Image (spheres, rainbow, N blue to C red):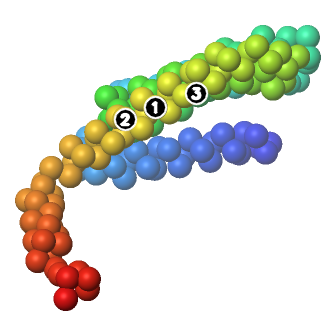
Amino acid sequence: MNRQAKAVAGAALVLLGAYLMLQQGTEVGPGQIFAHFWPSLFVIPLGILFHWMYFSLMGRKATGLLIPGGILVSAGLVCQFAMLLDNWAYIWPGFILAVAFGLWEFYWFGSRNRWLLIPINILLVLGLLFGAVFSISALTSSLNSLFPYAALVCILLGSFLLLKRSRAEH
């Protein structure tokens, strides 16, 4: 078994093991495995194929292959994380970042046309902004159970500030 095949088999076994650990107590069959790992089975390998075609077969004359390759690999990773963590509602800004990554690869390995940086940066900022907003909203929604304690801390801190005399008042 060559080095690349060992790496692919190892990564597949790690993902399968993680999935089986997360699914303890439930029935696991080929349907569930296929349903949870479809990005790793179809989307990511197709993106890797585009990269392989560019780097080993066609070279500099086919830099356009990097756009769909970068988008597919990035979107596949986003989909895989969303499938494993079941958080599609919060991870969708990753698709905007996937397009930015595909364009960035085209810029980096291509002719470095500086005008390409405009859409790359717009997509990057939008993806990061939406990602931050949705991450903060997810975090605050999970912190709702701590709301009574936060209210108590605010009341105590406010009372301390109101009752504390400054040294200048003495």
Q: Please name whichever residue, 101 or 41, is drawn nearer the observer in this view of the structure.
A: 101
Which residue: 72% across, 20% down? 117
**How many neighbours does mark 3 have within 10 angstroms: few (below 14), some (14-19), or many (20 or more)?**
many
Q: Secondary structure at mark 2?
A: helix
- Tag shown at residue 52: none
The residue located at (52%, 22%) in the rendering is 96
Q: Residues within 10 Å of mark 1 (few under 14, many from 20)?
A: few
Please name the residue shown 34% across and 29% down the image.
88
| Amino acid found under the numbered disc labelled 1 | Leu
Q: Earlier in the sequence, mark 3 or mark 1?
A: 3
In the picture of the structure, the residue carrying the numbered disc 3 is 124
Residue picked out by circle 2: 133
Quarter of the image with the N terminus is: top right
Q: Quadrant of residue 123?
A: top right
Q: Are marks 1 and 2 in contact (CB under 8 Å)?
A: yes
Residue denoted by label 1: 129
- Contact check, label 3 and label 1, Cβ < 8 Å: no
Q: How many marks?
A: 3
Q: Secondary structure at mark 3?
A: helix
**Given the image, on which type of amino acid does mark 3 rest?**
Leu
Whether residue 60 is visible here, answered yes or no, is yes
